[in-house]
Every structure is written in structure tokens, then in C-alpha cells.
Amino acid sequence: MTVPHDEGLTPEELTVWRMLQRAQVRITRQLETELLLAHDLPLASFDVLTHLAGAPGRRLRMNDLAGRVLLSRSGLTRLIDRLQREGLVTREACADDARGLFAVLTRAGEERLADATPTYLREIKARFIDPLGPCEITRVRGMLARLAERDLTAAP
């Protein structure tokens, strides 16, 4: 099957894009599998706990947390509900905004995160860092920084 190139992409450019997508999905699935098997902790939960652990007072407003994780607001609300049922986070009202809520990391959440972090780091190293050399990591970092800095709302 041939792909039309009326958008200015070469077959090689389209192939590289698809390879990037496949690599990201494959690595993420493997990482999630290991976190679930070893710690009964989905990757999205690990991500939320990590952001809370790094925040002042181990708390973030729900709106701020939604902006940091790769979930919709409704998806984050459902995840926080689940984490709260497990005792890993609590919700607290914002003193300066009656409608605002904080997600707060609990002691149990800290412990679960501390237990899961070595697995997370080991899997990143095995699945992403080790297959690349130090020079390649430096180049990938530069490329990703360039992409992250681009104004994605502007036309090319």
C-alpha cells in the first residue's frame, strides 16, 4: 500500500514517526506490566504518586496535577478516587478556593511509591537507557528538548 505524500512527508519521515510511536507504546506497556506484577500499581498511579511526592507539602491542586499527568481531568478524578480508596492519597479542600481540591500523598502512598520506584527505574534502564549508548542518550535528549520547546500551536 502506498501512502499519499500530499502533506510533505517522505516515506522515511513517516516511518520514523511510526517507529517512535511503537517504541513508546512498547516500552510503556512493559513498564506498566512490571509495576502491576511487582507492586499492583498501574503506571498512571505511579505517575500521580511521583508528582505528589515531589510537590511542596506532598500536595497539588487537582487542576495542577491534571496538567502534569497524561490524563484527562475526568480520568484523573477517577484515578484519585481509586487511589483514595486504597489509602494512597487523600483529598483536602483549598482554603482560598471553596471549589478547589488538593490531592495529598499519604504515608501509605509514600511507602508504595518507595517500594515501586526501584522497579520503575530498573525497567527504564533496561528498556530505554541500556539499548542506547551515552552519546545516543545525549542526542535523544537534545532532540526531545527541541521538540518540547516548539510552539505546537503555531503553524510550521
Image (cartoon, rainbow, N blue to C red):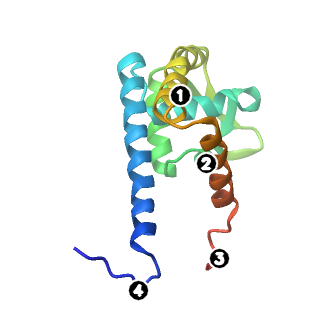
Quadrant of residue 31 within the rendered picture: top left
Quick one: label 3 or label 1, which is nearer the N terminus?
Answer: 1
**Looking at the picture, how far across and down is residue 106, in whole percent?**
60, 20
Disc sitting over residue 154 in the figure: 3
Mark 2: secondary structure: helix
Q: Residues within 10 Å of mark 3 (few under 14, many from 20)?
A: few
Quadrant of residue 29 within the rendered picture: top left
What separation in Å lies between label 4 and label 2 (alpha carbons)?
29 Å
**Looking at the picture, how far across and down is residue 7, in whole percent?**
44, 82
| Foreground of the two, 113 or 129 | 129
Residue type of the residue flagged with mark 1: Lys
Mark 1: secondary structure: helix
Quick one: label 4 or label 2, which is nearer the N terminus?
Answer: 4
Quick one: label 1 or label 4, which is nearer the N terminus?
Answer: 4
> Which one is closest to the eye, mark 3 or mark 1?
1
> Which one is closest to the eye, mark 2 or mark 3?
2
What separation in Å lies between label 3 and label 1 (alpha carbons)?
35 Å
Q: Do the CB atoms of the residues marked 3 and 1 lie less than 8 Å apart?
A: no
Residue depicted at x 53% and y 14%: 115
> Which one is closest to the eye, mark 4 or mark 3?
4
Residue depicted at x 51% and y 25%: 120
Residue for badge 2: 140
Residue for badge 1: 125
Where 106 falls versus 82 (above or below)?
above
Residue type of the residue flagged with mark 4: Asp
What separation in Å lies between label 1 and label 4 (alpha carbons)?
39 Å
What separation in Å lies between label 1 and label 2 (alpha carbons)?
15 Å
**Looking at the picture, how far across and down is residue 103, in whole percent?**
61, 34
**Looking at the picture, how far across and down is residue 8, in whole percent?**
47, 81
Residue depicted at x 61% and y 48%: 140
Residue type of the residue flagged with mark 2: Val
Quick one: label 2 or label 3, which is nearer the N terminus?
Answer: 2
